[in-house]
Image (tube, helix red, strand yellow):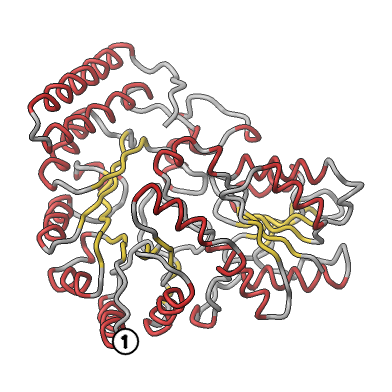
């Protein structure tokens, strides 16, 4: 049986990512690839990141896989639909290819994907489900699927059937390391080195997040929290250093410091085995203390991203973030005092946010003074509480086949263009407060004033739909 795994992300088609140029290997499908191999099923991975859609299509025609499994998220959805269309348009060459989709995008759009041409949609974790599907399709081309948990499919009566959720893997320590050897990791290191002067690899130590932020999707791991043994994590770190030459690790976990006991064991393991590698994490302010920050520093952490989303406590509470903005500010400053970089995330345009809240966000950034921050306009992901809250005030219903949830706009305090100017205002004001060069400060202040003027003009205009992309 020929099994091909891919993800449909092409960095050459992403103008924003080309500016940032911080690509990471697709850990999800590499975990599944390793799990299938461990259970006796050979497979191939087509890492599309540095390839083109044409190269993926040629690979499909050459391999003629019995199963093609495609990781699907907001960024890859439209490309995945093109792949499905290509396969279904080449039935003479690919008459028996089964299309299996997984990832965070498919659970809440399963019928659309199935009607578009997918054979099976996998929701939740993919390892056990994919293994079970492979075993079934190996026996016969059209097996009975009603007993397979964690999937949706169309039955013989043209009905979409959604089976019960699969129980999450309780002990994720049993999972093999991702099959990184199936892709060219050096390509990632090279582009990082060329753009940033250092190279980075991604590692996962946990699955799930027990917090309840209303804008965050839990389509794959739910609200669970499962952690790998610190010894296994350090084993993986050392394996990576033995097989590859890179500079830093990005731990992709939602909240790296959620369990302080685990962190202490991890730090002890790293130090005892002399396995310190510079690393970067995401945390929450309420899961940081001075002791935790010190542990991070001692074990090689060089940057901590601390979620805030807003400088307004009113908006943070509306998001159900369950954290105090003052605590976020103090933790950002504490991380910096310990000689690490601090980063944070900002989201504008959340329901209920007004101009005073945006001003508080600017004050928040000036006071806490993070080394880096990201800023975006809120968008509702289907299946989240935020989506449910604003679904009745969508500005327009976009065709599913040609759009993603990132394109959805809804009625807010101000129109979409206003937030475009608000982002520019905040960015220029923050840069102004950081700069010591007189001429640059003048330029930044003029840009900030222009953006502020744009905000005021858009407030006067009201709420026309805007086509500005974020």
The C terminus lies in quadrant: top left
The image quarter in which residue 401 lies: top right
Q: Position of residue 409 (x, y in %)?
A: 45, 29
Q: Is residue 274 left or right of residue 72?
A: left
Q: Is residue 344 left or right of residue 188?
A: left
Q: Within 10 Å of the Cα at label 1, are there few (<14), some (14-19), or many (20+) other Cα atoms?
A: few
Residue at the spot of label 1: 273
Residue extending farthest to the right is: 92
Q: Nearer the viewer, residue 321 or 245?
A: 245
Q: Nearer the viewer, residue 317 or 404?
A: 404
The image quarter in which residue 426 lies: top left
Q: Nearer the viewer, residue 179 or 367?
A: 179
Kindly identify the residue that appears in the image at 61 percent across and 51 percent down: 48
Q: Is residue 106 visible?
A: no
Q: Position of residue 76 (x, y in %)?
A: 58, 45
Residue extending farthest to the bottom is: 272
Q: Is residue 294 left or right of residue 280?
A: left
Give the structural element (helix, strand or loop) at label 1.
Answer: loop
Q: Is residue 226 visible?
A: yes
Kindly identify the residue that appears in the image at 48 percent across and 29 percent down: 394
Q: Position of residue 62 (x, y in %)?
A: 81, 54
Kindly identify the residue that appears in the image at 63 percent across and 57 percent down: 102
Taking 444 as reference, is 338 above or below it? Answer: below
Q: Position of residue 252 (x, y in %)?
A: 40, 62
Q: Is residue 257 left or right of residue 298?
A: right
The N terminus lies in quadrant: bottom right
Taking 11 as reference, is 331 above or below it? Answer: below
Taking 316 as reference, is 46 above or below it? Answer: below
Kindly identify the residue that appears in the image at 48 percent across and 56 percent down: 188
């Amino acid at each position: 049986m020929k099994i091909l795994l891919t993800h449909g992300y092409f960095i050459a088609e992403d103008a924003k990512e080309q500016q940032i140029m911080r690509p990471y290997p697709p850990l999800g499908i590499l975990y599944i690839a390793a799990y299938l191999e461990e259970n006796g099923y050979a497979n191939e991975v087509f890492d599309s990141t540095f390839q083109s859609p044409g190269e993926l299509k040629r690979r499909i025609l050459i391999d003629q896989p019995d199963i093609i499994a495609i990781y699907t998220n907001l960024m890859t959805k439209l490309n995945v639909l093109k792949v499905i269309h290509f396969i279904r348009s080449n039935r003479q060459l690919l008459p028996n290819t089964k299309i299996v989709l997984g990832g965070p995008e498919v659970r809440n759009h399963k019928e659309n994907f199935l009607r578009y041409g997918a054979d099976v949609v996998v929701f939740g974790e993919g390892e056990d489900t994919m293994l079970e599907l492979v075993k079934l399709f190996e026996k016969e081309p059209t097996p009975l699927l009603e007993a397979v948990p964690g999937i949706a499919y169309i039955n013989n009566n043209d009905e979409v059937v959604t089976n019960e959720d699969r129980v999450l893997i309780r002990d994720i320590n049993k999972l093999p390391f991702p099959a990184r050897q199936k892709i060219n990791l050096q390509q990632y290191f090279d582009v990082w080195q060329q753009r940033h002067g250092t190279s980075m690899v991604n590692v996962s130590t946990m699955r799930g997040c027990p917090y309840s932020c209303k804008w965050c999707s839990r389509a794959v791991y739910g609200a669970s929290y499962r952690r790998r043994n610190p010894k296994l994590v350090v084993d993986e770190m050392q394996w990576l250093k033995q097989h590859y030459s890179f500079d830093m690790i990005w731990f992709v976990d939602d909240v790296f410091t959620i369990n302080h006991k685990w962190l202490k064991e991890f730090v002890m393991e790293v130090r005892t085995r002399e396995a310190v590698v510079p690393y970067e994490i995401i945390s929450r302010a309420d899961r940081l203390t001075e002791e935790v920050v010190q542990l991070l520093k001692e074990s090689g952490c060089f940057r901590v991203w601390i979620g805030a989303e807003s400088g307004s406590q009113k908006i943070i509470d509306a998001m159900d973030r369950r954290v105090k903005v003052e605590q976020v500010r103090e933790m950002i400053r504490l991380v910096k005092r310990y000689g690490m970089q601090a980063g944070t995330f900002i989201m504008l345009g959340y329901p209920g946010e007004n101009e005073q809240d945006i001003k508080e966000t600017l004050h928040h950034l000036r006071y806490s003074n993070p080394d880096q921050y990201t800023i975006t306009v809120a968008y509702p992901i289907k299946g989240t509480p935020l989506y449910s809250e604003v679904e009745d005030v969508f500005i327009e219903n976009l065709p599913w086949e040609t759009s993603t949830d990132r394109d959805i706009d809804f009625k807010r305090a101000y129109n979409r263009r206003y937030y475009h100017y608000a982002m520019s205002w905040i960015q220029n004001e923050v840069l102004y407060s950081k700069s010591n060069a007189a001429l640059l400060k003048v330029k930044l202040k003029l840009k900030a004033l222009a953006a502020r003027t744009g905000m005021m003009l858009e407030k006067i205009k009201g709420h026309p739909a805007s086509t500005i992309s974020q």
